[in-house]
Amino acid sequence: MSDQQARIMNEAGEWWLRRSEARGEMDGAFEDWLAADPAHVDAYARLAATWEDMGTSPTLGALADAQSSPLRRATSHTLVLGALAMAAGLAAFFMAPGLLDPPQARYATVVAELERVTLADGSVVTVGAASQIEVRMSAQERRVHLRGGEAFFEVAHDPARPFFVEAGDTQVRVVGTKFDVRRNSDSVAIAVREGLVRVHRGAQEEIGLLRAGERVDIIRPALLTAPPPATITPINTAPAGAWVSGRLNYNDTRLADVVADINRYYAPGVRLNPDARELRVTAGFATSEIGDFMDLISDVVPVDVERRGDGSYQVDVRE
């Protein structure tokens, strides 16, 4: 990372925080800063996209409106400093070799659509329903960003060029293997069919090494909330990536993640009461059997299910 790149990324982080606090009162100066250099636009867009990918946003605008007691001022100042430190960390992440290069390819699917693509290195990626990936390849590494949804990877063996999959702040590193990555709004799940993958959360925390037949679910909580521990467990249902052949399988899985998957296959959609998100489900069904599953789910977990006239479902915790 050059000094100039670091300076621009730090400035982008400062502008993002200042605009959060001032609620747009400095838009003129901000627009002047953007217009001064195309690199400013790129840095700010990448920083904003990262906050969106993390599913978080600092509530600095609300803090600016809070009463100005010494305790509140101290709390606000602490949060601003913490967010600036995070922005600096994001700057280092973005300035890693190859990350500033634009994606060489993007693939996106719609509800109930799967797409199988062969990358330039011979790796094959099956992009799940309502999912998006971006691909970057260089002489040193291969990198795929899963922006949302699910993808099954069959990575061509190349020890000289490690293969990385990014899903928010979760990173998977492999050389050659078959594995699945699912990214929902507040969770990332990795499951391995063949080979080994190494999983990290953030820049420092190593989740561990996953072997064939193992999986891990990583919960991504709101900003300033400590994440729960991520435990590697055996896969007790169908092999990783079974959805490629049209079957969804869950073992002690959060209902929130099951519903998120269903909504990528079932267009009318399922709306889940937040109180039911953490209920656990063990089930397996074909994507063509989603309606049958929704009709029977109340036999599996303590919920009430209402099917509406448009075909959508409402799921609430049973009283």
Image (cartoon, grey):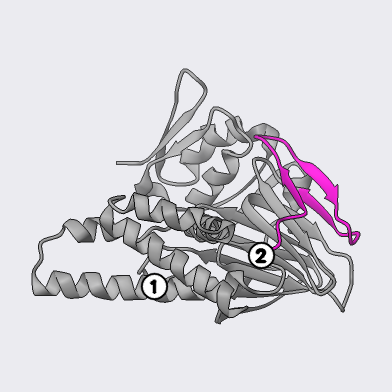
Tell me the crowding category of disc 1: few under 14, some 14 to 19, or many 20 or more residues within 10 angstroms, Cα based: some
Give the secondary structure at mark 2.
loop
Q: Which residue is mark 2?
A: 100
Give the magenta range.
Answer: 101-126
- Residue 297's disc is none
Q: Are marks 2 and 1 in contact (CB under 8 Å)?
A: no
Tag 1 or tag 2, which sits nearer the N-term?
Answer: 1
Viewer-proximal residue among 249 and 138? 138
Query: Tag 2: residue type?
Result: Leu
Does residue 81 show up magenta in the picture?
A: no
Tell me the crowding category of disc 2: few under 14, some 14 to 19, or many 20 or more residues within 10 angstroms, Cα based: some
Which quadrant holds residue 271? top left
- Location of the C terminus (image quadrant): top left
Left or right, residue 192 beside residue 37: right
Judge whether 210 appears above or below 245 on screen: below
Query: Tag 1: residue type?
Result: Leu
- Count of numbered badges drawn on the protein: 2
Which quadrant holds residue 81? bottom left
Viewer-proximal residue among 79 and 183? 79
Give the secondary structure at mark 1.
helix
Q: Which residue is mark 1?
A: 84
Question: Quick check: can you spot residue 222?
Answer: no
Residue 37 x, y percent position in the rendering: 55, 59
